Image (spheres, helix red, strand yellow):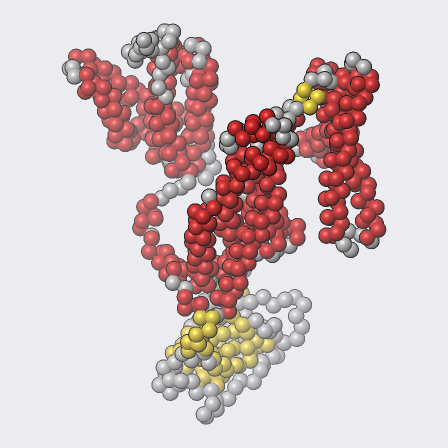
């Protein structure tokens, strides 16, 4: 028999009143601590976020004023909701007799409440503050967030009353309404924080047509065109010191193309610190011998040979008259003359006439550059995936709970292993110092030295870790009954001292370095370092004494937690950030992008692989262990066959991700097509940028098709 009866109509006035005064208090009085604290913290956070959001309208937000307006609005909305609920109660009691209609009347109250929020927003806000005060907050967000918070506040008060009236075995009230109201509140705040402006998006969508047209159909820039350019030059001096007359003006020439000036010496246009422009000398440019009706362009070449098209100083695109002649006026443009310049500053005015472009059918330089960048991007993703697999595969076994949870050791053996590991790492460091000297320095043979270092690190560390564990086991037996405890206490004390020293030093330099100057923090850093060493040494001593040396420690879970934590930290940092670090480390280029993607790939694939291992069928593992198979045999014959299909799927999917990621990595200098794309965008070369966008889209679509077929075949 089901003993969970409906408690919808029963209320505890005390619990309701307490939660009405302080959200969650009634729930906590009913010993629903988690529910009550969640409600209290939720109301505080949502209220604070609402006040902060609505106050951002002012240039210098006044949060005290925002709090006042918001609090009054919440009270008004709460009063409105209580009135509607009271009206609904009276209607259900005296007028509406149909049970179905009564059940749906609550939804009607909610709908009417939010309609009235919209209709009565003006009067409600007028009571919350003056016109000047209301100009400092976002009004729409204020009214809707206040309405949502008031609804949540009243709900939790009635929720407390229901919980307070519960009898043993009765079900807890539903949280559905609370979740709905909080979602509406978060939506209202998010809408304002993200500055969504649909009116602007709809009314100004035509502004995107110029860019979108060039991005979506850039194929003309994919091919090379030939064009003849006729260029005629005239020298001019600027600035014009006293006594200077400037270069000679060109003379008109029959049957030849020519340009000339009325004045070949003048002053530059200048701009002061406030941005006010003072135009320089106005010159008249005239010329002849050009093609009648053809457009010519006026360019300016400064004394160091850089040509540019003058802007804002006169007409620079001119149509020739029927005789192929023109005349126009132009102010000498603005430019900076370097302080070390000596002698007369001679500029050149260029008039260019371009012929019609002729299609050649060959790929343009931009298209060739984009194709090279796309190939680089694909290879970046491939190499990052390849090296990511090599590193992530072994780490995934360390990050699999079902494989690591069964690995236990006595505390004495674990302590011996840790001490042996530290000795092994130290010995590797000493050995590598001598090896580097033998090679004549790290820069002489970096790759061989790195390979030797990796082999020595793993080999010597593993050897000494094993020897240390066995040595402590042997000494424990040699010392008798309490030998393992004695060794564990001594070892854990020593193990605690080293990290304690480093943490104390880090606390002094890091945490204390925030309020204090670095010099003041450095004066007492050794005190904190020694204090940290003593504290952690005592903690290690106490832990070993409490545990006893013969007690088993789950070292597998220690390795699991450590591996997972490191991978989560690496994975939480975006590849873009890793790319920035790599660019600073080794300079811009595809190698920097490779390093960034590989780091993130190792962490991401390690997580996916480990979760695949955790979801395998334990039956084959147990069967092999029952036959006496060791851990390596169990992994090879029971684990690997089960994880190959998801491993292949995850690997191919990660390659797809890496190809797309490598385009983003290029934005910070990580090579690939992304590096080219961001340069074209910065130079407003949207036709060329469109080529890159199309190549990226085609490549990603092709890889998706290929990967889906590979998964279909092998998975």
Give percent across and percent down for residue 209.
Answer: 35, 58
Q: Residue furthest bottom?
A: 254
Q: Give left or right: position of 341 versus 325.
A: right
Give percent across and percent down for residue 64.
Answer: 45, 27
Quarter the N terminus occupies: top left
Vertical placement of 520 versus 489: above or below? Answer: below
Which residue occupies 53% across, 60% down? Answer: 375
Which residue occupies 34% across, 15% down? Answer: 158
Which residue occupies 45% across, 84% down? Answer: 287
The answer to whether residue 281 is visible is no
Q: Quadrant of residue 142?
A: top left
Give percent across and percent down for residue 155.
Answer: 34, 19
Vertical placement of 447 versus 228: above or below? Answer: above
Q: Quadrant of residue 421?
A: top right
Q: Give left or right: position of 169 versus 656.
A: left
Vertical placement of 43 versus 380: above or below? Answer: above
The answer to whether residue 424 is visible is yes
Looking at the image, how many numbered discs can be counted on the residues?
A: 0
From the viewer's side, name the closer residue of 333 and 225. Answer: 225
From the viewer's side, name the closer residue of 617 and 526. Answer: 617
Which residue occupies 74% across, 44% down? Answer: 455
Give percent across and percent down for residue 290.
Answer: 42, 85
Vertical placement of 411 versus 588: above or below? Answer: above
Q: Give left or right: position of 351 versus 541.
A: left
């Amino acid at each position: 028999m089901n003993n969970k009866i409906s408690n919808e109509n029963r209320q505890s006035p005390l619990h309701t009143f307490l939660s009405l005064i302080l959200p969650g208090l009634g729930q906590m009085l009913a010993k629903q601590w988690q529910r009550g604290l969640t409600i209290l913290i939720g109301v505080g956070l949502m209220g604070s976020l609402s006040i902060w959001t609505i106050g951002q309208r002012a240039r210098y937000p006044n949060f005290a004023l925002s709090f006042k307006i918001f609090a009054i609005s919440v009270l008004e909305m709460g009063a409105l909701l209580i009135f509607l609920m009271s009206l609904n109660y009276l209607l259900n009691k005296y007028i509406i007799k149909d049970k179905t209609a009564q059940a749906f009347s609550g939804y009607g109250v909610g709908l009417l409440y939010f309609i009235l929020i919209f209709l009565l927003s003006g009067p409600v806000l007028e009571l919350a503050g003056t016109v000047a005060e209301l100009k400092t907050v976002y009004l729409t967000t204020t009214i809707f967030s206040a309405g949502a918070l008031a609804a949540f506040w009243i709900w939790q008060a009635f929720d407390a009353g229901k919980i307070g009236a519960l009898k043993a075995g009765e079900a807890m009230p539903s949280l559905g309404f609370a979740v709905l109201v909080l979602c509406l509140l978060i939506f209202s705040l998010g809408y304002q924080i993200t500055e969504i402006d649909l009116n602007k998006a709809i009314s100004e969508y035509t502004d995107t047509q110029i860019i979108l047209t060039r991005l979506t159909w850039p194929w003309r820039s994919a091919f090379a065109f030939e064009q003849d350019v006729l260029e005629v030059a005239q020298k001019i001096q600027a600035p014009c010191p006293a006594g200077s007359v400037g270069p000679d003006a060109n003379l008109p020439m029959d049957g030849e193309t020519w340009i000339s000036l009325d004045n070949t010496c003048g002053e530059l246009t200048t701009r002061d610190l406030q941005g006010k422009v003072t135009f320089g000398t106005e010159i008249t440019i005239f010329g002849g011998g050009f093609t009648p009706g053809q457009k010519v362009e006026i360019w300016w070449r400064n004394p160091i040979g850089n040509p540019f098209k003058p802007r804002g100083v006169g007409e620079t695109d001119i149509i020739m008259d029927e005789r192929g002649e023109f005349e126009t006026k132009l102010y000498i443009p603005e430019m900076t003359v370097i302080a070390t310049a000596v002698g007369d500053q001679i500029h050149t005015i260029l008039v260019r006439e371009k012929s019609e472009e002729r299609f050649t059918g060959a790929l343009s330089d931009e298209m060739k550059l984009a194709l090279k960048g796309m190939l680089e991007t694909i290879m970046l993703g491939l190499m990052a995936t390849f090296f990511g697999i090599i590193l992530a595969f072994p780490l995934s076994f360390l990050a699999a709970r079902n494989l690591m949870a069964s690995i236990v050791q006595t505390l004495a053996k674990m302590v011996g292993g840790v001490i042996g590991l530290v000795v092994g790492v130290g010995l590797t460091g000493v050995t590598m110092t001598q090896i580097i000297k033998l090679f004549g320095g790290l820069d002489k043979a970096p790759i061989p030295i790195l390979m030797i270092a990796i082999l020595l690190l793993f080999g010597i560390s593993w050897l000494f870790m094993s020897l240390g564990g066995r040595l402590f086991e042997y000494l424990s037996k040699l010392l008798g009954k309490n030998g393992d405890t004695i060794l564990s206490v001594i070892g854990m004390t020593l193990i605690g001292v080293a990290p304690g020293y480093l943490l104390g030093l880090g606390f002094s330099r890091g945490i204390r370095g925030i309020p204090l100057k670095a010099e003041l923090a450095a004066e007492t850093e050794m005190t904190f370092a020694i204090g940290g060493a003593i504290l952690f040494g005592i903690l290690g001593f106490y832990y070993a004494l409490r545990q006893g040396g013969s007690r088993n420690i789950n070292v597998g879970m220690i390795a699991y937690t450590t591996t997972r934590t490191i991978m989560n930290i690496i994975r939480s940092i975006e590849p873009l950030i890793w790319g920035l670090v790599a660019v600073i480390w080794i300079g811009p280029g595809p190698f920097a992008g490779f390093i960034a993607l590989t780091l993130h790939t190792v962490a991401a694939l390690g997580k996916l692989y480990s979760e695949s291992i955790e979801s395998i069928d334990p039956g084959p593992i147990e069967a092999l262990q029952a036959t006496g198979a060791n851990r390596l045999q169990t992994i090879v014959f029971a684990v690997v066959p089960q994880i190959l299909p998801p491993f292949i799927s995850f690997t191919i999917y990660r390659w797809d991700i890496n190809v797309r990621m490598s385009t983003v990595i290029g934005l910070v200098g990580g090579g690939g097509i992304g590096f080219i794309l961001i340069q074209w965008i910065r130079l407003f070369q949207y036709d060329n940028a469109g080529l890159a966008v199309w190549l990226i889209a085609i490549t990603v679509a092709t890889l998706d098709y290929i990967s889906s077929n590979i998964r279909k075949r092998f998975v």
